[in-house]
Amino acid sequence: MSNKTGKSTPRGGKTSFQVKPVRATAIAAVVLEELSHQYGDCCNYLEAASLVRAGSPYLALTAIQQHNTSRIVASARECWVQAQALAVVKKLTDPEIDRWPLTKVKWFQTEARCKRLNQKFVALANRRVRGEKESPYSAELYRFYEALVYVLGETPPVDDIAEAAHYGPGSTVAIRGAQVHYQRKLEAEECTPLAIDLAALALSHDKAVWAHIGMDPVYSQNPDAREGFLRVMRERLAVKATRHDRLMFIHKNIDSLRSIGAQPTCSGALQLGIHSILSPLLARAGIDLQDQSWNQKLAYLGSRNWESENPFCTLDKSDASNLICKNLVTFHFPPAWSKLLMRVRTPGYEAPAEFGGGLYDYELYAGMGNGTTFVVESLIFWAACYATSSMGSVQSFVDKRDFAVYGDDVVLRRDHAQRYQAFAKFLGFRFNVKKTFLDGPFRESCGSDYYAGIPVRPATLDSETGLLGTQDLIGFHNTLADNLDFPLPGACLRIRKIFRSSVYPLVPTDGQGNLGFRPMGVPYYSLVKTKDGIVPVSPAWQRPRVYMLDVEVKRANLGRLDPWTEMAVALLKARQIQTATESQWSLPVRNAVFVKIVPERDLERVDLVTMLRNQLNRLAVRKAAPWWESHRGFVEGA
């Protein structure tokens, strides 16, 4: 069965099974009803459940907010209940709510704010040059620059950045739709005018590009051949040079959209090259962009020890990436780095049709979609943390590591957090008062929420279309099921019944991942049976086999490729099928998968079976334990 299959016949069935769409509002209503029944002492969301079931999620959200406002949160249990009620509604969509007018107003207000900030930084720079009275926060600005130099150095490694440049997985100005893979981007040859030289240098490292423009990659290390390549590539890039990215807005929550700028293809590759070079440099400063656990740990400590004199506090900003004005980078980064970042950023944007279209210049440095935005904002907020700290040197600040930074998610001690807030506001940033916690037992950072040290992160229901796919439904169920502190077994049972009646009559099981529903109260759900209805025991697994999801990505045929491009796509895990006349290559299509529910495969490799059998023989003594027979589980659950 795939996501597009309309009918399926279960094993042994005589009539076809009609697949029906699972509406996100139906699942939200189930959770709100079960919260009201199981946690009725601290909530009653039955009115909101009726509203969301009737197709009015925005009214349901309003009812939940009003209900939560009327209740005082005095325990982790009450905190989680309120958060869970909001989480099943706030990221849905309501056909009665037009999000575009507010989005347009907010966008141009943010750009106007960045324009004023740019003017402020120009004025401060002129005052400094003229030697007039000292600028506000001059000491902090000096320490801010000192921290940037500690991480970046004075001169960027341009050759390393060019070699590290690579295409990202998303759409670009020229490449859009489902097929946004490497081969299509190889043909785009577009970048900003200031980035042409650097883009040509980056492309010279890709031998598939040499073959694409008709030059022999064998000579890619020959100085004369490289010079010829760079000259030809600069000419080709100049033809398609553009000053504008494509501004888009994607689903964020029920009443707002999130901005993202699709970059010129080669500019985007350069931006990701900078990200690749800066990430390990940031690691020297105690910022690991591959790991959010340090933020989560300090948030936990701040919540657990909230009554101490100086606990950790979590700080969250509003529109952080969109409020990095371009002159903050121009005037306060090391000059060579500032010049490089301004070369690879896209200076303007093409507004969407909902805004009336048109071409505009950015006042912000770069929003989401630019490959440098995340690493630059992490660097800015870390440098601001050092600038407002009491440590005498950057090294001592890093060694003590009494901070956590991941993008705009910052965790600091309370006395430090107050100084940091003041300086960050001077730099132009705004704090989200609903998600910044200096007092009280609640803390949240990087997807982890705690109340007095107890995890209270809810399961979030996110749907832009109003429908839930099989993987989304199972993932939401399992997040609920994995919450042992605040269980909702009734909601999980009803979700599985909805799956059985709407999606497929056999319920898949997965005890750890999301290829099936998490077992609750039973070892397994639907079991694989023979034609006679007997449940066989796998000789390898020593238990019955279950049903699981089989997820296969949809792939795009790349057509005829030259040998150099074949090597390049092979490194990107392209699939090769050898026919009688040629090799056919394919790459995954973005966000497109086929989902089937299939019997769990038994262990078939003889060497692995032998290894497992030997291990079981060594552990055979455990079979005498009283729990062994029941542990193997032959009972099907709901």
Image (cartoon, rainbow, N blue to C red):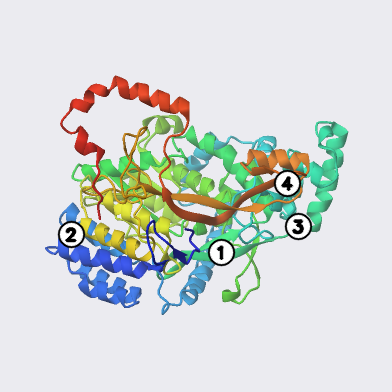
Q: CA distance from mark 4 to mark 1?
A: 29 Å
What is the CA distance from the residue labelled 2 to the residue labelled 1? 41 Å
Disc number for residue 203: none
- Nearer to us: label 4 or label 1: 4
Question: How far apart are labels 3 and 2 at the CA level?
Answer: 56 Å
Q: CA distance from mark 1 to mark 3?
A: 26 Å
Q: Earlier in the sequence, mark 4 or mark 2?
A: 2
Residue 61 coordinates in the image, percent (x, y): 31, 71
- Do tag 4 and tag 3 residues touch (Cβ < 8 Å)? no
**Farthest-out residue, top:** 618
Q: Residue flagged by tag 2: what amino acid is it?
A: Val
Q: Secondary structure at mark 2?
A: loop
Q: Earlier in the sequence, mark 4 or mark 1?
A: 1
- Label 3, residues with CA under 10 Å away: few <14, some 14-19, many ≥20: many
Who's the residue at 36% across and 55% down the image? 474
Secondary structure of the residue carrying tag 3 is loop
Q: Which residue carries the number 3 mark?
A: 241
Asked if residue 458 lies left or right of residue 385, the reply is left
- The residue under the point 31% across, 73% down is 52
x and y percent of residue 588 in the render? 60, 50
The residue identified by callout 1 is 115
Give the mark, 1 or 3, whose residue is nearer the N terminus.
1
Front disc: 2 or 1 = 2
Residue 601 image offset from top left, x and y in percent: 43, 41
- For the question of whether residue 334 can be seen, the reply is no
Quarter of the image where the C terminus is located = bottom left
Query: Which quadrant of the structure image shows residue 160?
Result: top right
Amino acid, disc 3: Ala
Residue linked to disc 4: 199
